[in-house]
């Protein structure tokens, strides 16, 4: 699976600091406190790259010495953290873009089918921003991301980008097929999904690792697969190799 050419909408950071911090994040001995700090630092670096193409307009500035024409960012930006794990990415993005609006969407992945289930949506009736940045550390099957883009487009979002820390090839294929216009910014594209739909080598469960919630050995990402889940993953992998 790894090594397939990536579609042109996928941007993988090449920054050495991103690679360094991501390796610390993956380490199973990294505590939730350090994990949260790294999520924040990585989001800052990826956010900087994801916003590199924002349009700007002229703005007159009076310096203490004279007037000059500076620039100001043009589009109104909305941050869309996908609960829970996307929450840890919000503060870093707000540091970069303090005027951004934050619109929360709650989705969880059903354990058996790996299908996204929506449980919270705080969007107003019509879109209030020109650019939406979806914040979610993991792009695994791509189901949650594709569903979030569906929701945002139905809301009237004109332009959407996905910012994630790690993606699986299966998730990139799903999201790019459903929404080829969505740019995907990631720190790394990993090898594949395992039979339970976790990214390998990955980092485990991003929500649990941020918030220190460990539900017991049966919820471990490496724990034995259910037939239905394994079949979902096999289907995604067959689609990918076509
Ligand atoms: C994780 C992650 C994504 C989703 C990715 O959330 O934060 O939202 O899984 O998987 P997908 O690409 O296969 O849809 P999870 O469902 O574990 O919810 P949580 O953040 O509340 O733990
Ligand atoms: N969600 C996670 O938190 N990790 C994965 O590897 C896949 C989905």
Image (tube, grey):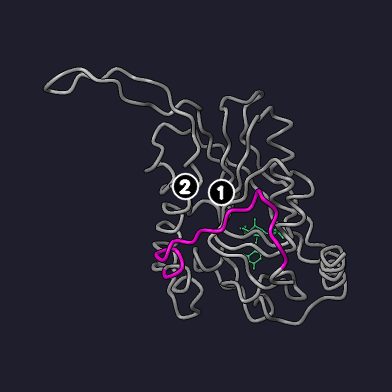
Give coordinates of residue 236: x percent, y percent.
Answer: 83, 64
Q: In percent of the image, x 69 and y 79: which residue is there?
A: 218
* In this rendering, position of residue 231 left or right of residue 67: right
- Using the rendered view, name the quadrant where residue 2 is placed: bottom right
Residue to which mark 2 is pinned: 90
Q: In percent of the image, x 71 and y 33: which residue is there?
A: 153
Image quarter where the C terminus lies is bottom right
Q: Nearer the viewer, residue 25 or 122?
A: 25
Q: Is residue 155 magenta?
A: no
Q: Which quarter of the frame holds ligand 1?
A: bottom right
Local crowd size for mark 2, using a 10 Å CA cut-off: few (<14), some (14–19), many (≥20):
some
Image quarter where the N terminus lies is bottom right
CA separation, marks 1 and 2?
A: 7 Å
User: Secondary structure under badge 2?
Assistant: helix
Q: Nearer the viewer, residue 54 or 44?
A: 54
Picture layout, residue 75 above or below residue 208: above
* In this rendering, position of residue 96 left or right of residue 14: left
Q: Residue furthest left?
A: 65
Give coordinates of residue 105: x percent, y percent.
Answer: 63, 43
Residue to which mark 1 is pinned: 135
Give coordinates of residue 214: x percent, y percent.
Answer: 57, 73
Give coordinates of residue 225: x percent, y percent.
Answer: 79, 78
Q: In percent of the image, x 83 and y 73: which residue is there?
A: 230
Q: Earlier in the sequence, mark 1 or mark 2?
A: 2
> Mark number for residue 229?
none
Q: Is mark 1 within 8 Å of ligand 1?
A: no
Local crowd size for mark 1, using a 10 Å CA cut-off: few (<14), some (14–19), many (≥20):
many
Please state the extent of the stretch shown in magenta in the rendering: 4-20
- Pointers 1 and 2 in contact (CB under 8 A)? yes
């Amino acid at each position: 699976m790894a090594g397939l050419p990536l579609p042109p909408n996928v941007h993988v950071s090449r920054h050495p600091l991103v690679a360094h911090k991501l390796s610390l994040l993956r380490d199973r001995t990294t505590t939730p406190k350090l994990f949260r700090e790294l999520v924040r630092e990585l989001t800052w670096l990826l956010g900087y790259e994801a916003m590199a193409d924002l349009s700007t307009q002229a703005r007159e500035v009076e310096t203490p010495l004279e007037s000059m024409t500076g620039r100001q960012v043009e589009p109104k930006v909305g941050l869309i953290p996908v609960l829970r794990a996307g929450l840890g990415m919000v503060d870093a993005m707000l540091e970069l873009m303090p005027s951004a609006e934050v619109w929360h969407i709650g989705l969880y992945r059903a354990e058996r089918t790996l299908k996204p289930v929506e449980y919270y949506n705080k969007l107003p009736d019509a879109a209030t921003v020109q650019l939406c940045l979806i914040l979610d550390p993991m792009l695994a099957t791509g189901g949650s991301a594709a569903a979030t883009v569906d929701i945002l487009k139905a809301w009237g979002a004109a332009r959407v980008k996905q910012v994630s820390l790690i993606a699986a090839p299966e998730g990139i294929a799903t999201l790019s097929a459903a929404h080829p216009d969505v740019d995907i910014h990631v720190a790394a594209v990993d090898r594949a999904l395992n039979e339970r739909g976790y990214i390998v080598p990955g980092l485990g469960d991003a929500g649990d690792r941020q918030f220190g919630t460990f539900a017991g050995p049966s919820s471990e990402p490496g724990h034995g697969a259910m037939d239905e889940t394994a079949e979902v993953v096999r289907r995604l992998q067959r689609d990918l190799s076509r």
